[in-house]
Image (cartoon, rainbow, N blue to C red):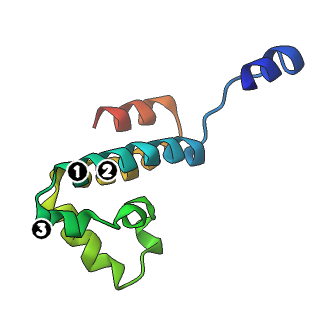
Amino acid sequence: MFGLVKTVFCPQAAIVFDVFHIVAQYNKVIDGVRRAEARAAMETDKNVIKGSRWLLLKNPENLKEKEIPRLEKLLSINKNLSTVYILKDELKTIWQCNDRQQMSKALDM
Protein backbone atom coordinates (compact mmCIF):
# COMPACT_ATOMS: atom_id res chain seq x y z
CA MET A 1 0.00 0.00 0.00
CA PHE A 2 2.61 2.58 1.05
CA GLY A 3 4.95 1.62 -1.79
CA LEU A 4 2.12 2.27 -4.23
CA VAL A 5 1.43 5.67 -2.71
CA LYS A 6 5.09 6.62 -2.98
CA THR A 7 5.52 5.60 -6.61
CA VAL A 8 2.20 6.94 -7.88
CA PHE A 9 1.70 10.12 -5.89
CA CYS A 10 5.16 11.03 -4.58
CA PRO A 11 7.80 9.51 -6.86
CA GLN A 12 10.59 11.70 -5.41
CA ALA A 13 9.71 11.03 -1.76
CA ALA A 14 12.35 9.56 0.51
CA ILE A 15 11.53 6.82 2.97
CA VAL A 16 11.70 8.29 6.45
CA PHE A 17 11.92 6.33 9.69
CA ASP A 18 10.86 7.96 12.94
CA VAL A 19 11.58 6.92 16.49
CA PHE A 20 7.93 6.23 17.34
CA HIS A 21 7.44 3.67 14.58
CA ILE A 22 10.84 2.05 15.05
CA VAL A 23 10.26 1.63 18.80
CA ALA A 24 6.73 0.36 18.13
CA GLN A 25 8.19 -2.37 15.92
CA TYR A 26 10.86 -3.15 18.51
CA ASN A 27 8.15 -3.46 21.18
CA LYS A 28 6.85 -6.42 19.18
CA VAL A 29 10.29 -8.01 19.55
CA ILE A 30 10.23 -7.39 23.31
CA ASP A 31 6.79 -8.97 23.58
CA GLY A 32 7.92 -12.00 21.60
CA VAL A 33 10.94 -12.46 23.87
CA ARG A 34 8.70 -12.06 26.93
CA ARG A 35 6.32 -14.76 25.69
CA ALA A 36 9.18 -17.13 24.87
CA GLU A 37 10.80 -16.55 28.27
CA ALA A 38 7.47 -17.13 30.04
CA ARG A 39 7.06 -20.47 28.26
CA ALA A 40 10.61 -21.53 29.15
CA ALA A 41 10.63 -20.23 32.73
CA MET A 42 10.47 -22.32 35.84
CA GLU A 43 7.28 -21.99 37.88
CA THR A 44 8.64 -19.39 40.32
CA ASP A 45 9.88 -17.13 37.51
CA LYS A 46 6.65 -17.56 35.52
CA ASN A 47 4.79 -15.71 38.27
CA VAL A 48 7.12 -12.74 37.88
CA ILE A 49 7.04 -12.76 34.06
CA LYS A 50 3.27 -13.24 33.85
CA GLY A 51 1.54 -9.89 33.43
CA SER A 52 4.78 -7.99 32.81
CA ARG A 53 4.07 -6.92 29.24
CA TRP A 54 3.26 -3.30 30.00
CA LEU A 55 6.12 -2.98 32.47
CA LEU A 56 8.54 -3.79 29.67
CA LEU A 57 6.83 -1.62 27.07
CA LYS A 58 6.36 1.51 29.18
CA ASN A 59 8.94 4.25 29.16
CA PRO A 60 10.78 4.29 32.51
CA GLU A 61 9.53 7.79 33.30
CA ASN A 62 5.93 6.59 32.94
CA LEU A 63 6.20 3.78 35.49
CA LYS A 64 4.21 4.11 38.68
CA GLU A 65 6.15 3.85 41.93
CA LYS A 66 4.65 0.45 42.73
CA GLU A 67 5.70 -0.90 39.30
CA ILE A 68 9.40 -0.10 39.64
CA PRO A 69 10.29 -2.89 42.14
CA ARG A 70 8.43 -5.44 40.04
CA LEU A 71 10.28 -4.37 36.87
CA GLU A 72 13.61 -4.47 38.72
CA LYS A 73 12.90 -7.99 39.94
CA LEU A 74 11.85 -9.10 36.46
CA LEU A 75 15.02 -7.71 34.89
CA SER A 76 17.21 -9.22 37.61
CA ILE A 77 15.87 -12.77 37.14
CA ASN A 78 15.88 -12.85 33.34
CA LYS A 79 18.93 -11.85 31.30
CA ASN A 80 17.16 -11.94 27.92
CA LEU A 81 14.38 -9.62 29.06
CA SER A 82 16.93 -7.33 30.65
CA THR A 83 18.91 -7.19 27.40
CA VAL A 84 15.95 -6.35 25.15
CA TYR A 85 14.76 -3.76 27.67
CA ILE A 86 18.15 -2.00 27.69
CA LEU A 87 18.40 -2.17 23.91
CA LYS A 88 15.08 -0.34 23.58
CA ASP A 89 16.56 2.70 25.31
CA GLU A 90 19.73 2.41 23.24
CA LEU A 91 17.59 2.36 20.10
CA LYS A 92 15.93 5.62 21.20
CA THR A 93 19.28 7.34 21.71
CA ILE A 94 20.11 6.94 18.03
CA TRP A 95 17.45 9.53 17.24
CA GLN A 96 19.14 12.06 19.51
CA CYS A 97 22.26 12.09 17.33
CA ASN A 98 22.90 15.22 15.29
CA ASP A 99 24.77 13.69 12.37
CA ARG A 100 25.74 10.42 10.71
CA GLN A 101 29.06 10.22 12.53
CA GLN A 102 27.39 10.42 15.94
CA MET A 103 24.79 7.89 14.85
CA SER A 104 27.44 5.52 13.55
CA LYS A 105 29.31 5.77 16.84
CA ALA A 106 26.09 5.13 18.81
CA LEU A 107 25.37 2.05 16.70
CA ASP A 108 28.87 0.68 17.30
CA MET A 109 28.52 0.83 21.10
**Callouts 1 and 3 close, C-beta under 8 Å:** no
Point out the tag, 1 or 3, that comes first from the N-terminus: 1
- Tell me which residue sits at (73%, 19%) in the image: 3
Label whose residue precedes the other's in the sequence (2 or 3)? 2
In which quadrant is the C terminus drawn?
Answer: top left
The residue at which mark 2 appears reads as: 35
Q: Nearer the viewer, residue 99 or 90?
A: 90
Evaluate if marks 2 and 1 touch, with contact meaning CB atoms under 8 Å apart.
yes
Q: What residue type is labelled 3?
A: Thr
Q: Mark 1 points at which residue?
A: 39
Q: Residues within 10 Å of mark 2 (few under 14, many from 20)?
A: some
Examine the rendered structure and indicate whether residue 65 appears above or below residue 90: below
Q: Is residue 8 visible?
A: yes
Res 44 label: 3
Compared across the picture, whether 109 is left or right of 21 comes to left
Local SS, label 1: helix
Label 3, secondary structure: give it: helix
x then y, percent, for residue 95: 51, 44
Q: Distance between the residues labelled 2 and 1?
A: 6 Å
**Is 52 placed left or right of 20 in the picture?**
left
Label 2 vs label 3: CA separation? 16 Å
Q: Which residue is drawn at 53% across and 47% down?
A: 24
Residue 96 visible: no
Q: Which amino acid does label 2 sit on?
A: Arg
Which residue: 38% across, 50% down? 31
* Residue at horizontal 36 percent and vertical 38 percent from the top: 106
